[in-house]
Image (tube, rainbow, N blue to C red):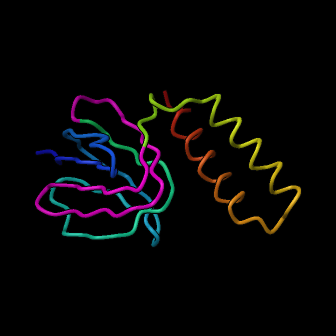
Amino acid sequence: MSLRIELVSPERVVFEGDAELVIARTSDGEIGFQPGHVPFVGNLVSSVVRVALSDGGVQRIAVHSGFVEVSDNHVALLCDVAELAEDIDVERAKASLDNAKNDLASDPSNADAEAAIHRAEVRLEASAGI
């Protein structure tokens, strides 16, 4: 038995497929979902979602907030922004990280720069697995 996974952003369906395990980070911490998991709803935080595919592969996805719902061997991830690891422009993510660090250095209370740093780090973490 496997899980049916759907990861959707406002622009598109980012990923659909069957999996043996999904690991996501919620506001309460990291959680894994396997077939037969009890119903669950949680807030996703900016992190890397890891999907252990039924064919033995692993799909890494950078997500930037949203929700996860689990019921009847179906995992729905609804994300504001989501990027498959192979779609991430690593050089752009590194440049964004450098720019955000410079912004934060000139204004240590810059919350936007802190958020940009975290988003870039999540993208780089997701892409490191490919």
The structure residue drawn at horizontal position 37% and vertical position 55%, both measured from the top left corner, is 79
**Residue 108 place in picture, x, y as percent:** 84, 64
Quarter the N terminus occupies: top left
Residue drawn at x 63%, y 37% as measured from the top left? 93
Above or below 6: residue 17: above
Percent position of residue 94, x then y = 68, 35
Residue furthest out toward the front: 11
Q: Residue at x 63, y 53 (%)?
A: 118
Location of residue 2 (image quadrant): top left
Q: Nearer the viewer, residue 124 or 29?
A: 124
Which residue is at 79% across, 49% downward? 101
Task: Please state if 4 lies on the left or on the right of 118 as rendered.
Answer: left
Q: In this orientation, which residue lies closer to the viewer: 128 or 117? A: 117
In the rendered picture of this protein, how many numbered marks are placed on residues?
Answer: 0
Is residue 58 located in the magenta-colored stretch of the structure?
A: yes
**Is 50 placed above or below 77 here?**
above
* Quadrant hosting residue 89: top right
Range drawn in magenta? 54-82
In this rendering, position of residue 13 left or right of residue 44: left
Measured from the top left, where is residue 9 in percent x and y? 34, 50
Residue 31: percent from the left, percent from the top? 38, 61
